[in-house]
Amino acid sequence: MTFGATPRRILPPVEGTMALFGIQYDIYRLYAAGFSIAALAAFFLFLNYTKIGTWMRAVRHDRETATAMGIPAKLVYVMTFAVGFALAGFGGVVAAPITTVDFRGGVDLLPVCFIAVIVGGLGNLPGTAAAAILLALMEGIIQSVANPTIARISSLVLMSAVLLLRPQGLFKGFAK
Amino acid sequence: MSEAILRTVNLTKKFGGLTATDNLSLNLPGGRLQAIIGPNGAGKTTLFNLISGLLKPDSGRVFFRDRDITGLRPHEISRLGIKRTMQIKSVFNQLSVTENLWITRQASQRVLHPFRPASRDAATRERVDQTLEQIGMTALAHRIAGTLSYGDIAMLEIGMALISDPQLLLLDEPICGMSPAETERAVAKIRELARRIDIIIIEHDMEVVFGIADDITVLAQGAVLVTGSPDEISNNERVREAYLGRPEDEDYLEEAVNA
Amino acid sequence: MIVFAAFLLTVPWTVPALINSFWVSVIAEILIWSLFAASANLLFGYVGLLSFGQALFFGFGMYGVGIGIDQLGLSFWPAFGLGIAASMAMALVAGVFAVRLTWHYFAIITVVFSLIFYFLAVSMKWLTGGDDGINFALPPTFSFGSTQWSFADPNFQYFFILATVAVCFYLMHLVIGSSLGKAFVAVRENDVRASLIGLNVYLVRLTAFVMAGFLAGVAGALFAFFGRYASASYMFYNISGEGLVWAIVGGAGTLLGPVVGTTLFIIIREVVSTHWEHHSLIVGVLAILAVILAPKGMVGLWRDALDRITASRADRSAPAKLRIES
């Protein structure tokens, strides 16, 4: 049975470990990192160098003007939704062997994703990626010195601080 | 009465690389209808935004009747009696004309009673009816504001500025977008109001400005170019330059037109 | 409306006769959750603030009662008071920070706040029992001499909940019709214009936030008494999300919209779950359909239908008026 309420474990396609910085590191995790970087790069190129990507950015900046220029705004929204879905799905597939397969996996991840988007700056793709890495690093570091719940709570408190003090995001970059 | 109703001292506001307001010092006496004109980008609306508290200046001060209002929040400035209309007409679109006026009147009171029904307030009801008559919109009292014509929305905005007994009225291009008939009506109204209330008006329509203003201040590139009476301004060479460019530019234009 | 109210008053007798007495508690639960949905509706429908944090205040109300009775040995009314005070205090503290933001920033910070306290509650198992929660004995509500009225009696329980919820809705009705209520709508419609007419937008929003916290807290406290139970799992933001969905599908910005929406979804949940375990699927599909087809909610649809009926009657009687420009 493929679906169902119980979480399931999946074996990674590439097993084994390799020595890295003095510890044994899962090879698959390196592959996962590679896939993610490739996907992000591809999306970045798509967004900035293809016609549809430019349409997306145009509609985001000023929907009315974009429509006046002949861009089908509604279609763009649908495509954006689809691309977002696809990226999330891809992320899930890549992450599956590392975490467990659980239909509720998204619920815990969602707030952190929103926070990464806001801390990185809305509409700022490199900023979001940087923010996500920063958040993950922060949580990881805190987790190694304190228990997981405290780690969670501290990173959430830090996120609130950013939201309150600098809602436009920590990174200036390609946005607007 | 010639005390300064509004005074700014070295008011400066920059947006990134753009200096919208450049060390602007104004001294506008009360009791006279003041007009502020200038070409696009001169910083007129920015000035209003700085006065009404929607923007904070980078440096400089704003005085309302010798009271320093620099840095006060918009609702505090409104409570002092400074009311304004916006360049892009802005009312409460989903509410009716009456409700717009009602809420404006009640907002100027210090405390909003959370449990007494708003409609019971007889004093407010009277004032709303009065204002509706003043602006000539009694027939439209129950129309939803978002469905009104542009000229009517502008009139409603003026009504909202009036209903809370303003000490100073800032009108930002009130005529913009009105039909000739609506313009006549609005100009007559403004002239009548100017007899009782201090008004500062930003306007592009020169006929209107020269018709009703007592004093005109010309802004260009965020600073005062010249101040004076309508006659002085209409004959001023530098004002003409600021709007129309230099005579050499006129030849350039002619060439382009004939090409 | 009157019929509906009359029906509600007779539930403990009519419902067991028509269906079965289990449904009396279901209706009591619906009333509690309608109050919760109403708190989300006050913020979203009237002030334009999308809050995913209402579960936080619900939880504080719930735990105020639970901890009050279990650990502090309080009786009914002090515990009730503690729950409400706790949720309002939390709403004030959270609101002071959250209300400084708007739009998606506000929504996200409400999620973040509710997550912070959810994790705190889960980690402080000694106090809160974490996700499993704490059970407690139910003290009587009123006791005069030897007679006692308590929630152990399902009829009393039902009427107490009905009375409390009705009072809260009446208070909401008063506020919405007051000048404060008009200020809410003004701030929602055009916050720049609102500040220019002299409204302190921040204070108006904060007031609404604390009021909504009060409503959610009362709902939480009632829920604790209802179930003799308090659990951190009700503080997670998906509970806030459910309240919002119920309010929006029922009709955001209307007084009874939340009641309609909550009733609809909980009845579906109860009816379908006896036959099929995936009732959430229906809930999801319904929510999507409702948002696409009836953006003003059920109450909105109802009002539009009424308007159309009265308009067609009016058209037939009055001739069209011309507006002449003078």
Image (spheres, coloured by chain):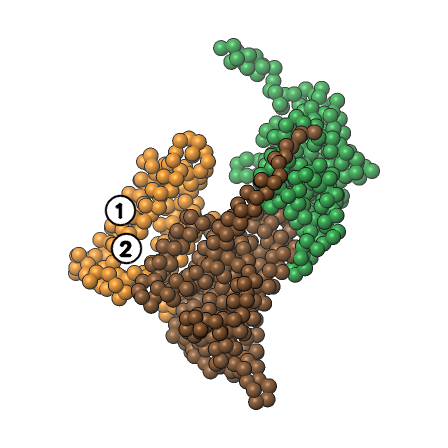
Chain colours: A orange, B green, C brown
Residue for badge 2: A92
Which residue is more in the foreground, B23 or A113? A113
User: Which amino acid, by three-letter code, is at mark 2?
Assistant: Gly
Residue for badge 1: A38
Residue displayed at 35% across by 46% down: A81
| Labelled pair 2, 1 in contact (Cβ < 8 Å) | no
Q: Could one spot residue C223 in this view of the protein? A: no
Q: Position of residue B238 (x, y in %)?
A: 66, 22
Helix, strand or loop at label 2? It is helix
Which residue is more in the foreground, A121 or C243? C243
Q: Position of residue A62 (x, y in %)?
A: 45, 38
Q: Position of residue C206 (x, y in %)?
A: 58, 58
- Looking at the image, residue A171 lies above or below residue C68: above
User: Which amino acid, by three-letter code, is at mark 1?
Assistant: Ala
Helix, strand or loop at label 1? It is helix
Q: Identify the subunit bearing mark 2.
A: A
